[in-house]
Amino acid sequence: MAELTEKVKDFFTSAKINKSTLMDVLSEFLAVEMGGQKLYEKALTLVSDSEVKTKFREFHRQTIKHQKVLTEVIHKLGGNTRAQSAGAKVATEKAQALLRSMDGNGLSKDQAELNAIENIVLAETKDHADWELIGKIARQSNDDRLREVLGAAASEVEQEEDEHLNWTRKKLGELQMESLTKGATSDKKSDSPKVEAPITKSSMKRTGGRARSRTKASSKSKSRARTTR
Ligand SMILES: [Fe+2]
Ligand SMILES: [Fe+2]
């Protein structure tokens, strides 16, 4: 959800929205929701964490609802949902690329699960931004009809989008940390870490400007002493 101060500012800002551009953008947002549905369906075949499965089923249902909300918005504003804008076609291609990255990628089961969740975070980042913008247009537009239609849609969806992104992003971090600690050996940190002696001006002089470690220098002088004996 947009920052409260930003929201308050929006109510004091008036914007004249280009209707044709808005319809193209709404077509794109609908394509994002449709891609999101497919991504959840694919991700659900790859995740095994029960909490993730439950949440993804819920988010998948809500994503289908968001498509219906957007379809109604487009119809109410006189648009046609069958005509895809150029932006919508690109959004569809992006979703297909994410879907492809989940197939035959050579990842282990655990890695495939993390990859699937990461793809949902990527898709939800865009979805979240879309609905934030819809809310912003509703607050700033000087067109009463736009304010009414977009405002009602945003208040129905925005909170769900907050959860889609925030929950998934947090869970991804937790599971990544879990995978990093899995099977790790219990290496103890050394009590007295070895500290390299700092290179001083006088040691640089002795080595003719070449930085040489104290260990190497001392072993060389020791072997010289042995050969002169
Ligand atoms: Fe959505
Ligand atoms: Fe979403």
Image (spheres, rainbow, N blue to C red):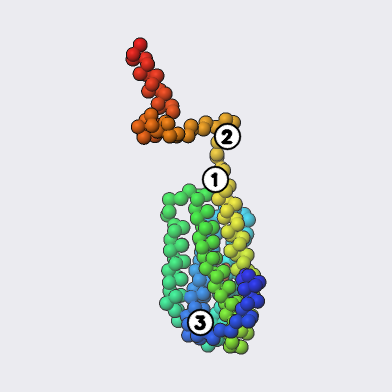
Numbered label tally:
3
Please, what is the three-letter code of the amino acid marked with disc 3? Leu
The image quadrant where one finds the N terminus is bottom right
Q: Which mark is residue 189?
A: 2
Mark 2 C-beta closer than 8 Å to ligand 2? no
Name the side, left or right, on which 82 lies relative to 151.
left
Q: Residue furthest top?
A: 229
Q: Residue at x 44, y 28 (%)?
A: 214
x and y percent of residue 138 in the render? 60, 81
| Position above or below: 69 against 104 | below
Is 102 or 210 nearer to us in this picture?
Answer: 210
Q: Quadrant of the C terminus?
A: top left
- Depth check, mark 2 against mark 3: the one in front is 2
Image side of residue 156 versus residue 208, left or right:
right
Which residue position holds label 3? 22
SS label for mark 1: helix
Towards the viewer: 29 or 48: 29
111 w.r.t. 145: above or below: above
* Image x and y of residue 55, in percent: 62, 61
Q: Separation of disc 2 and disc 3 at Cα?
A: 59 Å
Residue 78 position, x and y percent, is: 53, 88
Give above or below for 147 relative to 133: below
- Asked whether the viewer can see residue 101, the reply is yes
Mark 2 neighbour density, 10 Å: few (under 14) some (14–19) many (20 or more): few
